[in-house]
Amino acid sequence: MKKHNFNSGPSILPQIVMQQAAEAIVEFNNSGLSILEIGHRTPFFTGVMEEARALVKELMQLDDSYDVLFLHGGATTQFMQIPMNLLDADETAAYCDDGVWGSKAIKEASLFGKALVVASSKDKGYTYINKGFTVPTTAKYLHITSNNTVEGTQYFTAPDVSVPLIADMSSDIFSRQMDFSKYSIIYAGAQKNMGAAGVNVLVVKKEILGKIKRPIPNIMDYQKHIEAGSLMNTPPVFAVYVALLTLKWIKASGGLAEMERSSIEKSSLLYSTIDSLPVFNCKIAVEDRSRMNAVFFLNDNTLEAPFLDLCKKEGMVGVKGYRTVGGVRVSMYNALPLESVVAFTDLMKSFAASI
Ligand SMILES: *Cc1c(COP(=O)(O)O)cnc(C)c1O
């Protein structure tokens, strides 16, 4: 049976990307070698790295004041690598406490300097985006989580602040058009919306670097990575290649405008179905509901297990809520076809009718 893949990450990738990646494992670009066995400093791979870096910039419409790095370690490494590069011990960085991932970033930053929480939505279980806050002008930067994968909230306007803005876009990168030049750093683990696990992308406005006193180990130093063309040491070659294939697929499908159109179509269908069926409820403030991860509950929680069982039986994969949140979570990343959301909402309706 065909599965509908609503996994939150690693998650669904375009079919064509998987075919191309599989072909490259057998033989990469008529090289007589697999992508898994080519040298990372050969033109075969340096071409991949250069094209991937350029495509990120092109899709985000950023100029040469920005650089793009593909780094090891997942988004979690960036929780510490960002303050290590930007925040001296006697300085303050501002953070929005937007959910599970944002609070981890705050903890890590406090190892390097002062992490000041300027906004939090913890008071209401992270069910909304806190918008009325101010940031001290002395803060080195403000960090937000643009989409909260676990809780199901998303920023639809960037905070208007005078300090450099940094966003963890792990779960909504390349899902919509926006003015990316408002950000000084954008980072994301690849495994949600742009590829396979094992690499993260970091987009950085170069002028914010090189301003701290702390010595930075080479492998953690963004400036050194920029100088090395994102090839300081062996990069995760295959993961970078899958990211390139996904970026090409995004461009060929109509770019961020099309990703946004499709994600509005899918998420509107799902949320309107939730709202129309009294069995289900979504606690997220309507204007902050994530288009990527819809988190919702059954009003009668004894119905949760039977609903999830039915989903499993019908080939709906990955819809159980995060372990600390519970309920249902449906992730609708770029590669998820509308037909999967149609199938899921049909299932919701028949479940509601059966009880
Ligand atoms: C998944 C996720 C992370 C963690 O990513 P890793 O690559 O596992 O380190 C961080 N932030 C957000 C918003 C995420 O969704």
Image (tube, rainbow, N blue to C red):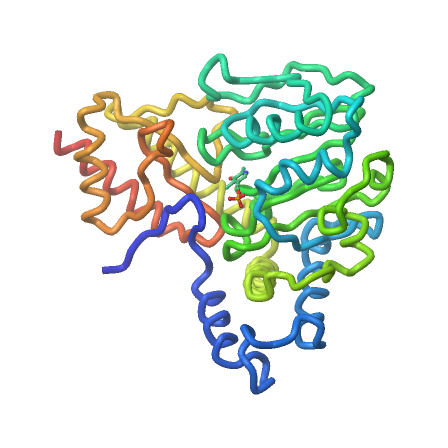
- Residue 258 position, x and y percent, is 56, 51
The residue depicted at 22 percent of the width and 60 percent of the height is 1
The residue depicted at 64 percent of the width and 43 percent of the height is 187
Q: Nearer the viewer, residue 93 or 190?
A: 93
Is 100 displayed left or right of 320 in the figure?
right
The mark total stands at 0
Q: Is residue 4 above or below residue 272?
A: below
- Residue 207 position, x and y percent, is 86, 41
Q: Nearer the viewer, residue 41 or 70?
A: 41
Is 327 displayed left or right of 247 in the figure?
left
- Residue 46 position, x and y percent, is 71, 70
The residue depicted at 48 percent of the width and 21 percent of the height is 126
Q: Quadrant of the C terminus?
A: top left
Q: In this view, does 28 lie above or below 177?
A: below
Is 6 displayed left or right of 108 in the figure?
left
The residue depicted at 71 percent of the width and 72 percent of the height is 41
Q: In this view, does 175 lie above or below 103?
A: below
- Residue 3 position, x and y percent, is 29, 55
Q: In this view, does 52 lie above or below 186?
A: below
Query: Which picture quadrant has residue 52?
Result: bottom right
